[in-house]
C-alpha cells in the first residue's frame, strides 16, 4: 500500500513563519512537522510515498533528499484548490488502495496501522475535538459515516471531526474527477456524494492526532511532542556546575556553560552555546547553532536555528524565527489576549511573542502578549511593542 501525503499548502495563518517555508516544514522539537508524518507512515510498514507539493516545494525536496528506507515521489499541485484536487494529482502513481494523510498534522503510527487494517474500501480516521465547528464534523451511525458537514454553523454539531486521513480505493479518482468537473474540490464534499450514492464509509478513531493552524498551536504541539517516548541524548560539552533535571537532549558540538539550570523536557540542537548561568525550563526547544547569553531565562518556547538571545533576557510561551537576534534585557509578557489572524479574532489563554526570521531586536525591549513581529524587522533599543509589526518594518 502507498501513502499520499498532502504538503502543497502555504499556511497563511502561520505567517510570518511560512513566508519563506511551507507550513509542513515548521519545526516541532527540532524536526519538521512533515518528518513526523513520514516517520509514522514508514513505521507502519508503508515503503512508498507520493508527496503532493506546491508552495516552496524546493524546501521540502531538499530537506528529504537523504531520507532513508522509503521511496518518495513528488507531484506538484500548481493551484491549491482543495484536498480532492490535491489527491487527484497522485492518480497516475496509484494502482491499488492507498491512504491519504495531511503533511501538517501530527499522527501516530498505531492510528495509521489501524486505518490500513480496516476491511472497508472507504475508511475515514476521526477524532473527538473540543472545537469541532472549525473542521469537517462527522455524523456516525453504527460505525459508518452518515454525513459530513464542513465547518457547521447553528445546531448541526457533533463532537467528532474528520482528521483528513483516509483509506481509499483507486476507483475514488473517478468520483473525484466527477466532483472537480462540477467545481467541487473539497474531500468532505466528495465523501458526501459517495454516501448519497450508497457507498459505505467506515470510521476508526485516531489515537494521537494534532492539528497546527495558528502560530500558538506550534507551542502546544511542541509541548506534547517533546514529552514523547524517545530517549534523551547528551552530546557536546557540559561544564562543571551545570544542573540538569528530567529529560534533556543536547546536540553535538553544543556547550553548556557553568551555572546553567535546565529542567526537562528540553531539546537543544547542535552547535549551540548556552550560558553561563542561563535557565531553560520545560517544553523548550532550541535549534541548531543558537546562542543564549548569560542570565537569560527561557520557558515553554520554540527557538529556531541560528538565533542569538542577549543577556538578562526572559522568554515565555514564545516562538523566535531562525536567524533572529535579540539584544540584552529582552522580555516578553506572557498572558491572555485576543489575536487577529487573517481576519479572524482568536482568544488565546497564555501566549508570549512570535518573531519571524532574521529580525534584529535592540536592547531593553518589552513585548506585550500575543504580538507578532514579522521577518526582517529591525527594532531599536528601549521600546515597548504593543501591536503587530509587519515584515520588513523598521521601528526606530
Image (cartoon, rainbow, N blue to C red):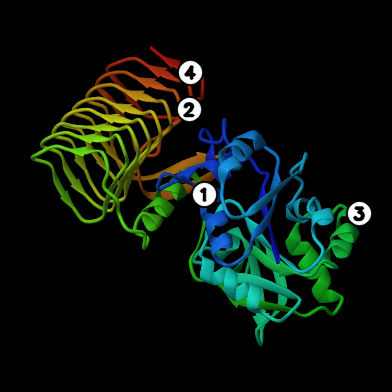
Q: Which residue is mark 1?
A: 33
* Circles 1 and 2: CB atoms closer than 8 Å: no
* Circles 4 and 1: CB atoms closer than 8 Å: no
Which residue is pictured at 66% across the width and 76% down the height?
A: 139
Q: Which image quadrant: the C terminus?
A: top left
Residue 104, x across and y down, in percent: 57, 51
Query: Sequence-wise, which precedes: disc 3 or disc 2?
Result: 3
Q: Which residue is mark 2?
A: 374
User: Residue 275 occupies which quadrant of the picture?
Assistant: top left
Q: From mark 3 to mark 4, how far is it between C-alphas?
A: 44 Å
Query: Sequence-wise, which precedes: disc 4 or disc 2?
Result: 2
Query: Sequence-wise, which precedes: disc 1 or disc 2?
Result: 1
The extreme top residue here reads 396
Q: Is residue 217 above or below residue 61?
A: below
Label 1 packing within 10 angstroms: few (<14), some (14-19), many (20+): many
Query: Sequence-wise, which precedes: disc 4 or disc 1?
Result: 1
Which residue is pictured at 18% across the width and 35% down the height?
A: 278
Q: 272 and 78: which one is in front?
A: 272
Q: Which mark is residue 183?
A: none
Q: Which residue is mark 3?
A: 181
Residue 347, x across and y down, in percent: 44, 49
Q: From mark 3 to mark 2, how far is it between C-alphas?
A: 39 Å
* Circles 3 and 4: CB atoms closer than 8 Å: no
Which residue is pictured at 66% across the width and 87% down the height?
A: 142
Q: Is residue 127 visible?
A: no
Q: From mark 1 to mark 3, how far is it between C-alphas?
A: 32 Å
Query: Sequence-wise, which precedes: disc 1 or disc 3?
Result: 1
Q: Is residue 251 visible?
A: yes
Q: Is residue 367 above or below residue 337?
A: above
Residue 167, x across and y down, in percent: 70, 69
Residue 326, x across and y down, in percent: 32, 24
**Is disc 4 placed on a helix, strand or loop?**
loop
Amino acid at each position: 500500500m502507498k501513502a499520499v501525503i498532502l504538503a502543497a499548502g502555504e499556511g497563511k495563518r502561520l505567517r510570518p513563519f511560512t513566508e519563506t517555508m511551507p507550513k509542513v516544514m515548521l519545526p516541532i522539537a527540532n524536526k519538521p512537522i512533515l518528518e513526523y508524518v513520514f516517520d509514522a507512515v514508514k513505521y507502519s510498514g508503508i515503503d512508498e510515498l507520493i508527496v503532493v507539493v506546491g508552495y516552496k516545494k524546493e524546501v521540502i525536496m531538499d530537506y528529504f533528499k537523504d531520507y532513508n528506507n522509503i521511496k518518495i515521489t513528488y507531484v506538484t499541485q500548481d493551484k491549491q484548490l482543495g484536498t480532492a484536487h490535491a489527491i487527484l494529482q497522485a492518480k497516475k502513481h496509484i494502482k491499488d488502495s492507498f491512504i491519504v494523510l495531511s503533511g501538517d498534522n501530527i499522527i501516530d503510527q498505531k492510528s495509521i496501522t489501524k486505518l490500513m487494517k480496516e476491511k472497508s474500501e472507504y475508511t475515514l480516521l476521526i477524532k473527538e475535538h473540543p472545537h469541532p465547528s472549525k473542521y469537517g464534523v462527522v455524523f456516525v451511525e453504527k460505525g459508518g459515516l452518515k454525513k459530513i458537514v464542513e465547518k457547521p454553523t447553528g445546531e448541526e454539531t457533533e463532537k467528532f471531526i474528520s482528521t483528513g486521513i483516509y483509506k481509499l480505493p483507486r476507483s475514488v479518482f473517478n468520483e473525484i474527477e466527477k466532483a472537480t468537473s462540477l467545481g467541487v474540490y473539497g474531500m468532505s464534499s466528495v465523501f458526501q456524494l459517495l454516501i448519497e450514492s450508497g457507498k459505505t464509509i467506515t470510521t476508526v478513531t485516531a489515537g494521537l492526532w494534532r492539528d497546527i493552524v495558528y502560530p500558538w498551536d506550534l507551542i502546544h504541539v511542541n509541548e506534547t511532542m517533546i514529552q514523547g517516548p524517545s530517549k534523551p541524548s547528551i552530546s557536546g560539552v557540559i561544564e562543571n556546575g551545570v544542573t540538569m533535571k528530567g529529560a534533556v537532549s543536547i546536540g553535538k558540538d553544543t556547550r553548556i556553560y557553568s551555572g546553567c539550570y535546565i529542567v526537562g523536557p528540553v531539546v537543544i540542537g547542535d552547535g549551540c552555546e548556552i550560558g553561563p548561568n542561563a535557565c531553560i525550563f520545560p517544553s523548550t526547544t532550541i535549534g541548531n547553532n543558537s546562542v543564549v547569553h548569560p542570565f537569560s531565562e527561557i520557558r515553554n518556547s520554540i527557538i529556531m536555528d541560528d538565533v542569538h538571545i542577549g543577556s538578562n533576557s526572559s522568554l515565555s510561551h514564545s516562538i523566535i524565527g531562525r536567524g533572529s537576534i535579540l539584544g540584552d534585557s529582552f522580555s516578553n509578557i506572557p498572558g491572555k489576549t485576543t489575536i487577529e489572524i487573517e481576519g479572524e479574532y482568536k482568544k488565546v489563554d497564555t501566549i508570549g511573542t512570535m518573531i519571524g526570521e532574521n529580525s534584529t531586536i535592540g536592547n531593553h525591549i518589552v513585548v506585550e502578549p500575543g504580538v507578532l513581529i514579522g521577518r526582517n524587522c529591525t527594532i531599536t533599543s528601549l521600546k515597548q511593542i504593543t501591536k503587530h509589526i509587519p515584515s520588513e518594518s523598521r521601528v526606530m
